[in-house]
Amino acid sequence: MIKRLKQNLLNHIFFSAALIASLLAALYWLAIAPDRYVSETHVIIQHTDLAGGQSMDFSSLLGGTGGSRPDQLLLRDHLLSVDMFKKLDASLNLRAHYSNSERDFLARMFPKDLSIEDFHSYFLSSVSIEFDDYAGVLVIKAQGYDPKTAQAIATQLVQEGERFMNGMAHDLAQEQVDFLEKQVAQMKERVLQTRQAVLAYQNKKGLVSPQATAETIVAIVAKLEAQRTDLQTQRSALQAYLVPGHPSIVQIEQQLEAVSRQVSLEQAKLASPNGKTLNSAVEEFQRLEMQAVFAQDVYKTALQALERGRIEALRTLKKVSVIEAPNLPEDALEPRRFYNTLVFMLAAFLLAGVMHLLAAIVRDHKD
């Protein structure tokens, strides 16, 4: 009889073990496991930014656009980072909360002085941050052994997340402003140098505007040419009825010679083979003035870009808008006692069945 009982026990040892394990699991989940409260919040990132090339108006300052998927995934990554965990631990003393000796050994963090990496892993098992593709929101769930702690964790995650997103956006905008300020300073120095070069050239040549001087000389030459033409006409008319040595003809010829000599002198000021004439001065002055005008235009463009950058730096805000505020839970949603017990029992008996089948196969091969 005893032998037969032992044989039956051996035949059903796996199911017996599964039954005992299930009873122990049921005892733990239904009576021992501490309550864990879950605080849930839904957030979305909204930001306003001044698009390049757009004019500034009050409607754009007041308007906002929804956050993009990359921003929200970036926020999720930061909220789950070790840096964020350290901030939460420093302000909420999570180490003492999760390692409280009032919790059972399996639920609490043990030992209390876990390394930061192991503690962070334990913390991640109590926090869930998922991105809902359909709704486009971040769903944050924080667990705690009391309602206030769970709500405090969720609330601080939202606050620190907004501070992080704004800080990152402002830092980037400030870097752009700093770069533009350096460019403006360089452009300003370049403008001053080009203007000084123009002034130095004017002082060197003793001319305010070589172009205007050249135009004046051209006008003088044209007037002298017209005067010489008139004198030549008068001489031809007198030669028709006066002898060549007549005083009137001699006087006109002297005037013609003086006018021609003056024309040659004025034309020599404009151009000559040695190159040191007014036309070369005009060319060099125009080149210096063109450089000064170009530098001034670039400086104006840089100033406009700087002003746009400063406006963007002031307006680059990424607000973590709370769609559903972190709630103060009244009922403990975790652990799911009956669900966990049922799942454990099914898994235990399934494993026992597999082991029993394997043992039967082994016995058949021995026989």
Image (tube, rainbow, N blue to C red):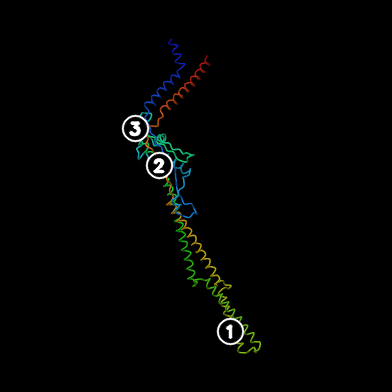
Residue 181 placement: quadrant: bottom left
The disc labelled 1 sits on which kind of residue?
Answer: Gln
Disc nearest the viewer among 3 and 1: 3
Query: Tag 1 or tag 2, which sits nearer the N-term?
Result: 2
> Residue 44, relative to residue 106: is it above or below?
below
Q: Amino acid at mark 3?
A: Asn
* Secondary structure under the numbered disc 3 in the rendered image: loop
228 displayed left or right of 154: right
How many numbered callouts? 3
Dot 1: what SS? helix
Q: Earlier in the sequence, mark 3 or mark 1?
A: 3
Mark 2 or mark 1, whichever is nearer to me: 2
Which circle's residue, 2 or 3, is located before the other in the chain? Answer: 3
Could you tell me which secondary element the residue under label 2 belongs to? Answer: helix
Binning the other alpha carbons within 10 Å of mark 2 as few (below 14), some (14 to 19) or many (20 upward) gives many
Quadrant of the image occupied by residue 104: top left
Which residue is identified by label 3? 100
Side of 237 where 357 appears, left or right:
left
Residue farthest to the top?
Answer: 1
| Mark 3 in CB contact with mark 1 (< 8 angstroms) | no
Q: Residue at x 34, y 32 (%)?
A: 100
Judge whether residue 100 can be spotted in this image. yes
The picture places residue 8, in percent across and down from the top left corner, at 45, 14
The vertical placement of 200 against 9, above or below, is: below
Q: Which residue is mark 2?
A: 158
Give the residue furthest to the right. Answer: 240
The crowding category of the residue bearing disc 3, from other C-alpha atoms within 10 Å (few below 14, some 14 to 19, many at least 20), is some
The residue wearing badge 1 is 255
Q: Quadrant of residue 92?
A: top left
